[in-house]
Amino acid sequence: MISPTTAELSDDDRRLIERAEAATKTAFDPDRWDGAHMVGAAVRAADGRTFTGVSMPSNVGRTSMCAEPVALGSAIGAGVCDFDAIAAVRHPLPQESREFEVVPPCGACRELIADYGRDVAVVVPHDEELRTVTAIDLLPTRNW
């Protein structure tokens, strides 16, 4: 498998992470969903506006939603359809000593992000640092 090309974070990417973390802090409720982790995402539109969303746990597992589609839906609801970058941040659980951490999108979210922009920069942890990679590079064997 060919390794995808990554890029260093820009100041705008760092601000995107901060927005995702802020959304996560706002939405996290350790008393709901048995303390299930909460993820916040922020998507930056090509015009520079940022939209956020948070994961939505559900008692019916398949109806749960990741944060990335919620953030994309927020932007699309505002009439935005051209995206530049996206980042997701995981809130630590109360019993954990970890800090907030950037998390890569799950497989379904990778597909969704690529559907809305093959060249969208996705912030991911890579070799113990944060980098960006294009959405399509997260799906190297996509054949449709």
Image (spheres, grey):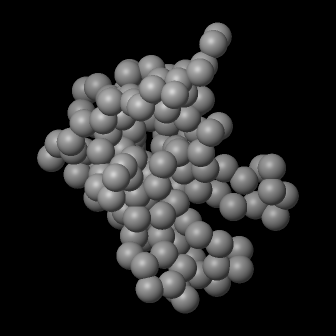
Tell me if I can see residue 103 in this picture: yes
Residue at image coords 71%, 74%: 33
Q: Is residue 85 above or below residue 66?
A: above
Left or right: where 26 falls relative to 84: right
Q: Residue furthest bottom?
A: 95
Where does the image place residue 118, in percent across and percent down from the top left? 45, 20
Where does the image place residue 20, in percent across and percent down from the top left? 38, 56
In which image quadrant can residue 142 be found? top right
Where does the image place residue 69, in percent across and percent down from the top left? 57, 40
Q: Residue furthest top?
A: 144
Residue at image coords 34%, 52%: 127
Residue at image coords 76%, 61%: 58
In which image quadrant can residue 59 be found? bottom right
Which is more toward the observer, 38 or 119?
A: 119
Which is more toward the observer, 86 or 110?
A: 110
Where does the image place residue 56, in percent across and percent down from the top left? 64, 57
Tell me if I can see residue 26 in this picture: no
Q: Residue furthest front?
A: 1
Left or right: where 65 falls relative to 133: right
